[in-house]
Image: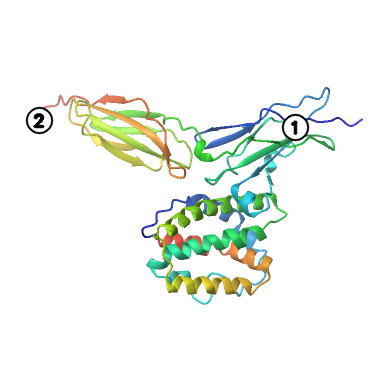
Amino acid sequence: LGACRVSMSMTEVRAGFTAIKANIQSRDPIRTLSILSHPHSLHKVKSSDRCCITHQLFTFYVDKVFKHCRTEDSFVNRKISSIANSFLSARRKLGQCHEQNKCVCGEESTEKFKQILANYEGLNVTSAAMKSLGELDILLDWMEKSR
Amino acid sequence: GDVLLPAPQSISILSTNMKHFLTWSPVIVQGATVRYSVEFQGEYEREYANGSWIPISECSLTTATVCNITEDISATVAYKLRVRAELGATRSPWGTTKGFFSRAMTSLTPPVLRVVADGHHVLVELADMGPSFQFHVLYWKKGQESRVQQKVVKEVSSVVHLDTMEAGAEYCVKARAHVEAINRSSSFSPTQCVRAQGDTSVWL
């Protein structure tokens, strides 16, 4: 992510998400809306803003999303915990980069993140959290493509 | 009357090569089969989910006194584990690990390898240590210890070709395991050397 080097085992996070993706997405009744991709895809974010939007999105998932995704299914809860703790670990390193000015936020990433928050707050919290979790592969695809 | 069950004691985590096991001492009740249930808590649960605990279903109501927690210790953060005894409807208090456990604390053993001289080629075969592992293989011509070469092996699916040997020369190899997720390596394996077959054939 530019000057900021963060090692997160994408394989582990991807495997954890793939194991629960169908279950999570089945809990999202509103398929016509997107939290991460509306109105513009993450792929439109400039490379210079990539680190900052990643940091903001990890903070978004840690602070707002995972806690509202607890289910009655122990297997799903364990995988969500695995992803949440991986995001927490990576977010810490991104935060260190941010403090060292290696993860600067430009206007574009700030605007993009505002839009994501607006999409999120446009739904009730549980639907918004489940939808956001169900869209995790959008984030993972974008992160892997922009490595 | 109802049996008073004590919390399991001597709770500890054994972790080698990124495989993590929780163990504890059995709770003895004469003539009865005591069962145990295990739960874990990551840093996320402590900091953002009201200190919640998550049950490990494979170790719910188990009679064993060991639980494979590898699948759940899947991020490089600090975890806590707890276990309680159960006998019918009676449950003991939780016994919780003292301090935290992070997978970065796992002990790493040197890889097992087999070096083969196949004609003029030095080949190395590495025993699989699991998905988290890659290997740093060092190799050099005996007597030229200052000209060590390194090859990073990310998958151990097949034999790895290291070098083409000069006839009659001896080549030495050693390797260590590396885990990217915790950014740590094992110590090196013992060095193994092989000699290339002398080239006795003469071209006429």
- Residue B36 lies in quadrant: top right
The residue under label 2 is: B203
What's the amino acid at mark 2? Trp
First-in-chain label (2 vs 1): 1
Q: Residues within 10 Å of mark 1 (few under 14, many from 20)?
A: some
Element on which disc 2 rests: loop
Residue A74, percent from left and from top: 69, 49
Chain at numbered mark 2: B
| Whether residue A34 is visible | no
Element on which disc 1 rests: loop
Residue B107, percent from left and from top: 49, 32
Residue A14 relative to residue A99: left or right: right
Disc 2 to disc 1: CB gap under 8 Å: no
- Frontmost residue, A79 versus B163: A79
Q: Is residue B151 above or below residue A124?
A: above
Q: Are marks 2 and 1 on the same chain?
A: yes
The residue under label 1 is: B7
- Residue A59 lies in quadrant: bottom right
Q: Residue at x 44, y 69 (%)?
A: A43
Residue A120, percent from left and from top: 61, 71
Q: Is residue B185 above or below residue B54?
A: above
- Frontmost residue, A113 versus A25: A113
Q: Residue at x 67, y 64 (%)?
A: A27
